[in-house]
Each structure stands twice: as C-alpha cells, then as structure tokens.
Image (cartoon, coloured by chain):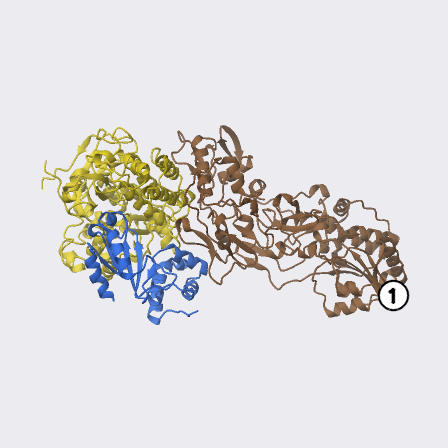
C-alpha cells in the first residue's frame, strides 16, 4: 500500500497503480477519455490533468501531469482542486466540444455519455467556439459497428483495442491534425468476434452497435448483472432489457474471467430470447396434435406414463445450458422421482479449438455449464445417446437454441414410447414430443453456471418467465413429487445452499458466499504468485457502464 | 484493382532495407518501403497498401494510417510531375503569393489538383527549409529558388 | 572590440567544390578528430562535451553533456541524427547535408563511441532529396574507406549508420515524434515521462537524439579541445534559476525574410538581433524593421523595441522568447502582422499531429480566428479571445502547456506574442473590417505593456571580441 495525499486528505491506496485507479479506489473521479486500464495509455485526451507533488519534492511541479500515466508512490501529493487543474479540465472539454455536434437528442450514448457527464461536472456552461465545425461523415466500420465521425473525440481507444486485445488492427487513425478520423482500410472491415467491444469502450457516441442503434434510450433499460451462456468461459455481463425484451448484453468487468470484454457470439447471441415463437404454454399431444394444457394435467400425465413404462426404463436428459440449481433438481428428479440411472447430458456445439486473440480467448465448448453438470452428476453422467439406449421413455431438457440434434439421436428420441420435452423454442423435437413444456432462457433464470475454470457465477433473473413457463427446477420438483418424491424448494437459492451442503465439490458455495464476482470451487493455493497485477474492480465500479 | 508487387530490383532493395532495423521491428521499414513503392507505382494504391502490409506484417489500416498522415505519400494517382510550392512565412514575405497565382493561372489548376493532361500536380508545401532562396518551389526532386513569374514559366516550359 | 563578423567553423569551406566527397573533406582536415577520439574513454568524452558548454541546436537548447549523462544503460543503444529540419525560417542543416555530410558522420562517430552505440540513424526530411543523396554517398564512401562498419577507422569499434527519410511531417522533428516515425508509425510524440529517449527511445531502447548542427560541433570540440570551444561565444554570470548561462561556440543563424542578403551566418553567440540583421545586409531597401522572429517560427516575435537583445540562448530566454533553431525571420514595415500570424497559424494547423486534444482543436481554432480578423470579419473582443484560446493550449505567462509535446508552445507563443505586441494593428483590422497595415510606430503596442524586454542584461562573464 502507498500513502498519498489527495486534495489535502490522506489515503492508503494499492501500490503501483495509476493515479486514476488510485483515486477510484478512494471514491474520487478523475475524468478521462483515452485512458483505459486494459489498454496502453497514450495520454492524448488531456482530461485527467492533475497537479502533482512527487514524493519529497518541495512543491508541485510546474507542468500539470496526466493522472493516467502517473503511478502512485508513497508520499505523493495530488490536487484535483487547484484552480489551474479545474481550468485545464474545463478548457480540454471546451476543445472537445468545439467540433462535437449537438445531436444528443438522437445519440445512442446520451445518458451514458462521458462527454455529457464530465461537461456537467467539470466543464463550462457556455460555448465560445464561433468558427466552422468539422462535419466528417457517418460510416459503417463493419457488420456490427457504425461510426458517427462527428462525435468522435479521437481518444483512440478503439484503435488500441484492435491492436492490443483483438489483434487484427482493423481500425486506424487516418489523416492528421483536426482532420483526424477513425476508419478502416477499404475492403477490410472491422469483422472479428470481439468487434462489439469497441462500442463499449467508446466514451462518446461515435461508435455505435448496429444491433442496438435507436433501440432504446439507455435510461429506460433495466440492467441486471448476469453471466453469458455462449461458451464455457462464463463472461460476466449485464443483461439490459426493456418491456420484457432483451435490448442488449454488455460485458461486466471480472479481473479473472473476461476483463472488460465479451465476444460477439455472446453479445449478439440473445435474439432467440426475444423470439415471438417462444414456447409459452404447456402442451400435450391429443389426437396426434399438440394442444395447450394445464401444468397439473401435463405433470400427472407424465408421471402416469413414466410409472407405466417403468422408472428404470426412463431416461432423464439434462442440458449443459442449465444452471447448477436446475441440474441438481433434475438429479433429484432422476434419483428420487423417476428412480433411474439413465441420466444423460444434452449439449450444444463443441468446436475443435479455442479462438485465441492476443488478450482474449473464446472457449471451444459452447456450453456454459458443462463443468457444473459434471460436478453435480459426477460419475453418473452419460451422454444423451447412452442414457437413451434401450429406454422406453424420456424426460428431455433442451433449452439450447439451434442445438445440434443429429439424426441418430433424433431417431432414438422419436422411437420412444413417451417423450416429454422441456424447451424454450419449438423444434423438430418438440414437434415429435408427447408433451412439450415451456422452460426458461438464461435471462429468465435464477441460479449459477460453473465455468470451465470451476468458478460458480450467478445469473440474475432479468426477465419474467414467458406465458405459463415454469423454471426448470420447479418443474423437476413438481414432476418428482408427482412420482412420489418429496422435494420442497421455495427458491433457487435454497437449492444453491442444498447443493453446497450435500455435494462435496460445491463445499462452501452457499448462496450467501457467491457474490457478483463468483465463487471459485478450486481456490488457488495461498502461493506467493498471487496478486501480481493490480485489478481494476474499483476502476470498473466507477467508470464501467 | 490493379495488382502490385515490387520489381525484383526493388524487392532486393526492400530486403536490404529490412537489415537496417532490428528483426522484430520490421514495421520500422514502413516509410522507406512506401517511398520505394511510390517510386514504382506513382502513388500508394489499395493494392500497394495490401502488398506493403503483407511485407511488413501489419494490417492495411496501419499502412493507410501512415499514408494519410504523411503528405508526401499519395493515396490517389498524381501527375507525372509534382510541383510543390512553399507558402510558409519567409516565402510569403518574399512574394510566393504572386508565384502561386501565376502557377495556378498557367496550369489552370488549384492546389492538390492535376493538370488536365495529367502532366503536373500542383501542391502547396510547408517550409522547404531554403528560406534564403525564397520564394522556392520543388519540382519533383529538385529545388528552385529566387523565383520570378518569368523563371516559373521557364521551369514549366521544361516540363511540358 | 570589433563589429560582429562571421566565424566559420562548421561552415568552413562549405562552398569548396566537392566538399561533400571524402577526399576533399579529408584534404581540409576532415576526420582529424578520430585520431584523438579513440584515445579517450567515455568518461573523458562526457566531461569534454559537458565542459564545452555545447547546447542542443535543435530548439530546446539542452546541454549536450547533461543529455549524455542521462543515457540509459540498456543494450543496444541507438543514436539518431535529427535531420528533419522543418522549422520555418531554418535551413542550416540543409547545407550541411548537401555540402559537408562527412562532418555529420564524423560527429556521429564521436557521439557513438562516447556512448557505446553501434547503430545510428539519420532521420532526414523527405524533401531533402539532394541532401539524402549526398549523405548516402558519403556513408558509402565512409564504409569503403573503413571509417564506418565493423571496425571504425581501424579501431575495435563497430558502427553502422543508416539514413531514414521522412515524408513531410513537421512533427517528426520532435524527438519522440521522430522515434515513432522511425518505428514506422505516424509521428505522434510520446508522453514524457516515461518516454524520455535517453531512457526509453527507439525500439524501447536508450536513444540519443541530436540535431545535425549539434553533432557537427563535436569534431571541432574534440580536435581543438574544450578550452578552445569555451573561448567562443558568450557566457553570463548569475543568471536566474532555470536559465543556463552558457552560449559557447558559434551558431548557424539562418536569416530570412526582408533582408538584403538572406543566408546562413555562422557567428559566435553574443551579438544582438540588430547586429545580426546588419550582418545580413540590413533590411531590404533601407526599410524600417517591423518585427523579427528570433528562433524559428515558434519563437515569440520581437518588436523594434527589442532589437538589442543578444541572439543567444540565455538572453532570448530572459526576453520570453527563444533561440530555438536559430531561424531569424525579419519583417519590414510593409508587413501585415495579422497576415504573418495567419500564415504561421496555417502552418501549425496543417502540421499539428492531432494526437492530443488542445493542439488538435486549438491550433486550427486559433488559425480560424486570425484568418477571420485578417479577412475583415473580426469581432470586438477577438484579440483577447485569440489570446485565451492560444493560452489554453500552452500558457506563455506560466510557461506551461496542456499538450503532450512542445508543439503546443510552438503554436501558442507566436499567437500570443503577435496579438499582444501588435495589438493596435489587430484592433485596426477589426475596427475597419479589412486588412490594414499600420506604420511601425502605430502598429506596435507600447513597450511598457506586455514586454519582457528591455530589461537588465545578465552580467557577462565573457563575450566574443570579433577582432579577427
């Protein structure tokens, strides 16, 4: 720790971090645009100027210093309040606004714009620029991102992102001086799987997501912390929704998982959640047709069928897209209700290889909770095909949009005497089922995924269940109880606790112990290699939206 | 898109250039490589950008970034001859205004334009560091000082 | 005491035919310093250069010895000769490169040996085609003669020198902008700290960057000794804190604009602006001086009231301007100072690299205001507005800048100094709504306002006698 004095007050802050980060640690905002803790610091925006007295110096140095490139040192003195600091920040904003359009009313960023916020807090209340504004054109940078050049403040965060994090260096700074413009080379669009991140790091409304453009004013969005479900990495995200629909997904900082980033597969892979085709009502096959039914009717019918065909002839297929809690409820359904050892795992795609970028990896396993399933079912887990081999009935939990259902598996499932499918979208499988029950998408779930690094991470229920849909754990419990079990869960949190107290692998991972940074099942040993790089939690909580 | 690659001689020159810089910093050869390419192609076309990016292991955007920063690189075709007129203060004090007017009138072009026959591109230039000979112009690689409209005419005649 | 006259050292024999060739250079004593050089070790050489008082000729005037002392220990180290001469009004390096390139090579060998450097670059402005051709040929000759390469002049010391042509960006004259450009990127200056080239320079290695003229002084310092060098120029006593009193050696003054005989004048430092203008044949047609820019276009302008300021590092700094690159631009009574400033601001607006906010926006903003005034579209209050905008980029009064590099100063200082010192002419433009050239006596603001000079000169320890 280092002792610093900021604006007359003494603080203890982490050693070796930038003054911007240190100030964030103690709750002080040092405004900045170009600086981002996970990118190189060019100090070009000149917004974070501070008055600095280096340790042991008799007084402040003559030049104002950029807080982003200054590392804290014991005994350092910093002023954010000196009149010349305030003046410098105000004039920097004046410069930034000189060519900036006044299109806040139609700008996507309005409401979460750092230019608005800092002008409000640190800027002048009038404009003195009387010359002609530059009006560079709007352009498309690639399939996912548009650039409103007029709004750009040339902080070059996006340029550095494509150079340092995604590595393709598709975005460059073109021309010179006041004609500086962000652009891509002809026929070389920004088309990589991390492209969406440049929109997040843009501190103004210059880079916009084509997907989100004009979709909603940000202040109408309901924002819930969650975890991405598109691979086993488990990127921390925010689900931002409006009127029961997901409006966008954005990464949430996690030092050990995804830093500030997420991939476009995850970011834009939510459309199925909003699909108008989603299953909303339980349905039973009557006279060859699936017709809406009540839950009681469906569950009683299922229990009857399963009992008739024999529990041990019934396969229970869980999905690698289910939460730990759902999986545990399904496990109890199989063991205590159905009474079968035919427990299989249905899973989404697994690619040949991870997609590796200079500072980000998209994992090959496109199932968010395989690790959870393996830890919960332990050795009892079979593949779906193995579990179905010789079975007469099955309770099948799907929930994986466009899941690869190969013909062999499909043939097995359709050959069953009884098939109950819990899913979220209609598919060939639901069409073939004797009963189809609406389940929940990840944005509607409570509970946790366990990522490939065995970190248990919490999802928020960002949206209500659709129609009459039941959470999968509720459905599993009801069905189990109809089969004679006695499973009493009031909430997903109770299952979390139950899992923590009964499964050795989840020892300690009780509901209370899992915060928004997750709970690591494999605690790192108390080695000395810990804490090499300073983390950015304080920074993220202050500056990451 | 007209394809581009270095002639064998220039490719050899390029490989010699690479030896000037540490191996892991091939990008350092960017400016000299672009000079070479422009010498051959006249301007840095899209094909040249792609070619140079490949040679140096950088992205096209990183090449274009450099090309657009430095005024001596052209990202569009230019005339056979480049005429750069210095218009910075010492030349301005010594009457470059008259020279500029004369050139624009004679060539019937404005700055950054090429004569209709594609012979001459007229550019304005910042200080050419020959203020003792003001007003000066540079025609291709050669500097000409102490200009008068008459002298300009002689020089232009020689280009036509 | 005689009248100031030229004392050619760097420029000695520069007009001699074929001086750019090795043979002719050698016939005139070229490479003589190498005979002494290799008998001296790094520490001796550092002391020699420090004691000589040699200051960087590129603009900032930093003591070369001081800079050498800061050189980092990492390997490899690099040497860069800054031949990106592009400060308006400066043209002395051009002639060194064209006519005496071996002098630069000799200077680079001295610096490289002293600092343990084996790889050096000459970053030469793209427009210097003849200079580059001559320098490349000189380097080839030097390799062939065993002066460069594996074993420099037969000693156990290897040195390679490469030329690297720029492509028309003024900002690449800034040493870290130059380094970025040398690395194949846009010439955007780096943030200092941490990127002081002596510590972290090109390819992130310790790098010594010197102007061509600075390096060209080294052969003479080594050949003739520190004492000899110290005897040239002016040295002051008891200068205020932060003002270096050393102005040893000669300076290549580039005189341009409205003088009878524009050109490079190599004179011992210590003469005044007025004397230098005289040396260049006086103002053209016997006209009155209206304004003089003393150190390249970035230096604050001087008025006729300030012509007795010695043109050296120390006094110009005390007069709140600078010797900079030694480009003296003389403007006579026919000059419109608003138009002159517009021209300069146009230059800076074109050359701003655009990296940092105050400069990217402030530079064209300043230009636009001046252009408006010149076009007769000025508004009351515009002069103060202009000064405020320029001061927000870099403040001349507090000697601070909000930009990454000192380009901010280069924009702000001329703008503020012109607007303040020639305020009556600026106001006349605004009042009359057109370009008005006032007589010198009316165009200049009264000396008691806004001037740092005339003031007491620092006491001289020694000044040249010019009695040769």
Residue C79 drawn at (x, y percent): 31, 51
Q: Relative to A207, is C39 on the left or the right?
A: left
Q: Does the rendering let one see residue A109?
A: no
Q: Quadrant of the N terminus of chain C?
A: top left
Above or below: residue A474 compared with residue C271: below
Residue B34 drawn at (x, y percent): 36, 62
| Rendering quarter of residue B4 | bottom left
Give the color of chain C as drawn. yellow
| Rendering quarter of residue A311 | bottom right
Question: Is residue B140 or residue C150 the one in the foreground?
Answer: B140
Question: Is residue A261 or residue C102 the one in the foreground?
Answer: A261
Q: In which quarter of the image is the C terminus of chain C?
A: top left
Counting the numbered discs, the total is 1
Residue A50 drawn at (x, y percent): 45, 35
Q: Relative to A132, is B116 on the left or the right?
A: left
Figure chain in brown = A
Q: Residue furthest front?
A: C432
Q: Relative to C4, is C197 on the left or the right?
A: right
In percent of the image, x 45 and y 61: which residue is there?
Answer: B60
Residue B44 drawn at (x, y percent): 38, 63
Residue at numbered disc 1? A287
Figure chain in blue = B
Q: How crowded is mark 1: few (under 14 residues within 10 Å), some or many (20 or more)?
A: few
Q: Does the rendering let one see residue A481?
A: yes
Question: Is residue C53 or residue B101 the one in the foreground?
Answer: B101
Question: Is residue A372 or residue A231 the one in the foreground?
Answer: A231
């Amino acid at each position: 720790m280092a002792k610093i004095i900021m604006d007359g007050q003494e603080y203890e802050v982490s050693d070796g971090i930038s003054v911007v980060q240190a100030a964030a640690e103690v709750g002080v905002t040092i405004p900045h645009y170009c600086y981002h803790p996970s990118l190189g610091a060019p100090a070009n925006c000149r917004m974070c100027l501070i008055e600095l007295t280096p340790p042991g110096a008799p007084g402040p140095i003559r030049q104002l210093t950029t807080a982003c490139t200054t590392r804290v040192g014991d005994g350092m003195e910093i002023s954010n309040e000196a009149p010349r600091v305030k003046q410098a920040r105000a004039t920097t904003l004046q410069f930034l606004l000189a060519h900036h359009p006044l299109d806040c009313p139609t700008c996507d960023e309005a409401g979460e714009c750092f230019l608005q916020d800092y002008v409000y807090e640190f800027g002048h209340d009038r404009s003195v620029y009387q010359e002609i504004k530059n009006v560079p054109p709007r352009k498309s940078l690639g399939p996912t991102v548009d650039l409103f050049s007029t709004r750009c403040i040339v902080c070059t965060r996006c340029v550095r992102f494509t150079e340092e994090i995604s590595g393709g260096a598709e975005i460059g700074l073109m021309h010179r001086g006041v004609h500086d413009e962000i652009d891509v080379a002809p026929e070389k669009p920004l088309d990589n799987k991390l492209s969406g991140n440049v929109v997040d790091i843009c501190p103004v409304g210059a880079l916009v997501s084509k997907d989100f453009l004009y979709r909603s004013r940000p202040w109408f969005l309901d924002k819930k912390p969650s975890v991405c479900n598109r691979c086993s990495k488990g990127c921390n995200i925010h689900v931002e929704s409006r009127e029961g629909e997901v409006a966008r997904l954005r990464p949430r900082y996690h030092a050990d998982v995804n830093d500030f980033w997420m991939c476009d597969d995850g970011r834009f892979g939510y459309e199925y959640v909003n699909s108008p085709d989603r299953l909303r009502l339980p349905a039973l096959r009557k006279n060859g047709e699936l017709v809406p039914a009540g839950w009681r009717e469906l569950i009683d019918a299922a229990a009857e069928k399963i009992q008739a065909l024999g529990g041990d002839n019934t396969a229970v297929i869980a999905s690698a897209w289910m939460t730990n809690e759902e999986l545990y409820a399904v496990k109890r359904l199989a063991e205590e209700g159905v009474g079968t050892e035919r427990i299989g795992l249905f899973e989404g795609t697994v690619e040949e290889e991870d997609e590796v970028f200079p500072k980000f990896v998209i994992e090959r396993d496109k199932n968010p909770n395989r690790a959870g399933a393996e830890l919960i079912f332990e050795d009892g887990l079979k593949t779906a095909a193995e579990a179905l081999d010789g079975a007469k009935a099955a309770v099948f939990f799907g929930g994986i949009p466009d899941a690869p259902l190969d013909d062999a598996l499909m043939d097995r499932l359709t050959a069953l005497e009884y098939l109950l499918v819990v899913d979220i979208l209609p598919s060939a499988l639901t069409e073939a089922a004797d009963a189809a029950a609406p389940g929940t998408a990840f944005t509607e779930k409570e509970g946790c995924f366990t990522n490939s690094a065995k970190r248990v991470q919490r999802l928020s229920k960002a949206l209500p269940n659709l129609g009459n849909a039941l959470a999968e754990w509720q459905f599993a419990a009801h069905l189990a109880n109809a089969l004679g079990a006695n499973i009493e869960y009031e909430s997903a949190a109770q299952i979390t606790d139950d899992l923590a107290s009964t499964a050795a692998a989840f020892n300690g991972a009780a509901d209370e112990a899992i915060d928004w940074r997750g709970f690591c099942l494999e605690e790192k040993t108390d080695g000395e290699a810990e804490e090499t790089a300073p983390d950015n939690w304080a920074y993220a909580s202050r500056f990451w939206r | 898109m007209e394809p581009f690659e270095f002639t064998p001689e220039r490719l050899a020159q390029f490989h010699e250039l690479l030896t000037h810089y540490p191996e892991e910093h091939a990008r350092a050869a960017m400016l000299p490589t672009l000079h070479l390419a422009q010498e051959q192609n006249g301007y840095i076309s899209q094909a040249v950008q792609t070619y140079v990016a490949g040679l140096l292991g950088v992205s096209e955007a990183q090449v274009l970034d450099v090309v657009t920063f430095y005024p001596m690189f052209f990202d569009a075709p230019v005339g056979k001859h480049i005429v750069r007129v210095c218009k910075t203060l010492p030349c301005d004090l010594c009457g470059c205004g008259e020279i500029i007017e004369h050139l624009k009138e004679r060539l019937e072009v404005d700055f950054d334009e090429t004569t209709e026959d594609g012979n001459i591109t007229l550019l304005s230039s910042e200080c050419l560091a020959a203020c003792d000979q003001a007003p000066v112009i540079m025609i291709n690689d050669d500097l000409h000082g102490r200009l008068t409209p008459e002298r300009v005419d002689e020089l232009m005649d020689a280009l036509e | 005491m005689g009248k100031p006259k030229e004392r050619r050292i760097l420029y000695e024999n520069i007009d001699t035919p074929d001086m750019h060739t090795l043979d002719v250079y050698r016939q005139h004593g070229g490479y003589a310093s190498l005979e002494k050089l290799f008998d001296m070790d790094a520490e001796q050489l550092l002391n020699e250069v420090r004691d000589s008082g040699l200051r960087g000729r590129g603009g900032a005037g930093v003591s070369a010895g001081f800079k050498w002392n800061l050189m980092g220990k990492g390997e490899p180290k690099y040497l860069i000769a800054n031949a990106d001469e592009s400060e308006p009004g400066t043209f002395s390096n051009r002639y060194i490169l064209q006519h005496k390139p071996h002098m630069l090579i000799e200077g680079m060998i001295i610096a490289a040996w002293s600092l343990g450097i084996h790889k050096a670059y000459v970053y030469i402005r793209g427009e210097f085609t003849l200079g580059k051709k001559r320098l490349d040929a000189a380097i080839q000759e030097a390799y062939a003669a065993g002066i460069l390469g594996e074993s420099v002049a037969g000693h156990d010391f290897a040195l390679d020198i490469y030329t690297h042509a720029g492509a028309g960006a003024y900002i690449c004259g800034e040493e870290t902008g130059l380094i970025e450009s040398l690395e194949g990127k846009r010439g955007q200056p780096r943030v200092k700290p941490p990127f002081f080239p002596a510590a972290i320079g090109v390819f992130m290695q310790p790098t010594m960057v010197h102007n061509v003229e600075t390096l060209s002084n080294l052969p003479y310092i080594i050949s003739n000794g520190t004492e000899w060098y110290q005897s040239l120029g002016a040295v002051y006593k008891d200068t205020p804190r932060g003002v270096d009193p050393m102005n040893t050696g000669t300076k290549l003054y580039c005189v341009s604009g409205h003088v009878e005989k524009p050109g490079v004048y190599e004179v011992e430092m210590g003469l005044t602006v007025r004397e230098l203008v005289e040396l260049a044949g006086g103002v053209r047609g016997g006209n009155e001086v209206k304004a003089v820019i003393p150190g390249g276009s970035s230096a604050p302008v001087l008025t006729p009231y300030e012509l007795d300021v010695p043109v050296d590092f120390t006094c110009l700094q005390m007069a709140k301007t600078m010797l900079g690159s030694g480009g003296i631009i003389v403007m006579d009574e026919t000059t419109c100072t608003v138009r002159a400033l517009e021209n300069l601001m146009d230059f800076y607006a074109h050359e701003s690299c655009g990296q940092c906010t105050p400069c990217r926006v402030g530079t064209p903003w300043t230009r636009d205001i001046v252009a408006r005034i010149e076009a007769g579209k000025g508004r009351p209050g515009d002069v103060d507005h202009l000064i405020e905008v320029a001061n927000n980029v870099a403040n001349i009064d507090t000697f601070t800048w909000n930009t990454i590099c000192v380009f901010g100063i280069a924009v702000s200082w001329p703008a503020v100094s012109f607007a303040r010192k020639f305020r009556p002419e600026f106001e006349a433009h605004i009042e009359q709504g057109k370009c008005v050239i006032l007589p010198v006596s009316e165009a200049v603001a009264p000396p008691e306002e806004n001037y740092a000079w005339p003031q007491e000169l620092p006491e001289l320890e020694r000044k040249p006698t010019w009695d040769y």
